[in-house]
Image (cartoon, rainbow, N blue to C red):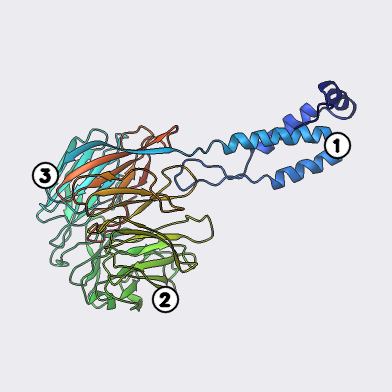
Amino acid sequence: MINKKFSTNFLEAKIRQEIDFREIFRSRLPELSRLETRESFTGSGMKKVRWSEKISAFFHQADKKKITASIIIVMIAAAATVLLLVNNTRRIQHVTLNINARTDIGSITTATPLVYDINGDRRLDIVIGDESGNVHVFDGPSLKKIFQYVSASPVIASPLVYDVNRDGEKEIIAACDNGQIHIINRKGEYLYFSRREFFSEKIYATPAIISRKEMEMIVMCGMGGTVCAIEGRYGLPLWKNSDLKAGHAQIFSSPAVLDINRDGVPDLLIASGNGYISALDSVTGNEIWFLKPGGPFKASICLGNFLSAGSAAALDMEGNLFIIDPEKGSLLLEMKLPAPSQASPAAADVSGGKFDEIAVNNQLGQVMLISPQNRRIIWTFNTSVNNEFKASPIFFDANNDGTPDVIAVSGGGRLYILNGKTGELVTRVLEIGENVTASPVLADINRDGHPDILIAADGGNLAVISIVTSPDTLVTPGQIIVPGFLNNRQRQGNYSR
């Protein structure tokens, strides 16, 4: 607080004698306002302010101009006020969960839906396959069906949306149980499907899209252990490999996509039911390296910055977590967890440090946050017995405290939002009322500024659940946060763009 003896008249006299303080402060205020910022995990615009360099430069100028101590105090007080106003833009939110809408797709589904504006009307659409062989597209805000495409075989894997034929419009890529890939345009019309004489194994995992200079590639993993690639324009065969170490067993998990051999083209990282992990060159289909760290894998590999930049996390069916260096094919860490899990792990920087943390849920009804760097479980949330998790968790800063929170849906249909720092409930548990295998999807489907969790229940019901925050909204209307990631019982990843 400024002493009363520094009256207005005194300050004005000093300013007139030495320098016009108002002009200096006005000229320096834009610089003080240009704060170094870092976007928060939620994309909600959290400001991270660094004042040290600004204040240091400001004092240096003050010394040069011989500004008196009283004027400097006034200036610091004004700067502190600006800082307080900036920091107050992040307010902790009260969070509630409301079921906004439901619809029935009419058939059993365990595939994670996908959110995307398919028809270009600036409204988010929902794409989902079912076990009767249908691909449904719904208008997100109204849940009215736009079209239904009928294939010849169950659509077990989650769909993709990508411009695979480079015609300027996105297509839907649906992988079927009979080994075929169906390419569907935005009107629901069939463009082509892949040739069963080239590849006919059942497909449970969502394919990967590899973008090369000359073409788009679609890579499929079969339940017979074969991995193959077709080009995206006409579905012509490119390569097939049936002799991978990771291929001598069923492949439930979707490939992770990253440039392993640093040739400028993304490669593939695949975990299989025989406990092997293989790295594949996406151009040739040849194996770059293989590793057998543990038991059978059903969960897809999760990429992140764990013990090194660009590392990978794999979770086996025996409850072991492995951190792998994809470039070298070496094992960096092995951790024994309390119980097995079928769902893929999720990664986010919860601690605000150099490396990511990992969220895992398991068959005992537990959700855990793990620090690979410190080789420990940070917290564990216990739900109840007979509450096995099949769906993968996702991250979102629901309460706007600057830390990603964990969203998890149990197999019994209970929705949890857990504080990323403590593992405590952010809001009440929501009972969906049906069994759930598919992982949640997150987007502002109805464009009200509140993110919506989209959940597909096993019986075929779609539920849109709003994360209602007060006093503020956290997202841009229509924002897509988690479009279709991570995984479901068939261990699908999602690589839509």
Up the image or down, 432 lies above or below 244; here it is above
User: Which residue is the site of mark 3?
Assistant: 106
Is residue 210 visible in the rendered structure shown here? no
Quarter placement of the N terminus: top right
The quarter of the picture where residue 238 lies is bottom left
Foreground of the two, 265 or 136: 136
Residue lying farthest to the right in this orientation: 17
Q: CA distance from mark 1 to mark 2?
A: 60 Å
Reading the image, the residue beneath label 2 is 331
Q: Amino acid at mark 2?
A: Leu
Q: Which residue is mark 1?
A: 65
Distance of mark 3 from mark 1, alpha carbons? 76 Å
Label 1 packing within 10 angstroms: few (<14), some (14-19), many (20+): few
Give whichever of 346, 150 is nearer the camera. Answer: 346
Residue lying farthest to the front in this orientation: 384
In the displayed structure, 312 sits above or below 193; it is below
Of pointers 1 and 2, the one earlier in the residue sequence: 1
Q: Please report whichever mark, 3 or 1, sits nearer to the chain's N-terminal start.
A: 1
Residue at horizontal 43%, vertical 46%? 397
Residue lying farthest to the top in this orientation: 9
Amino acid type assigned to the residue bearing label 3 in the image? Gly
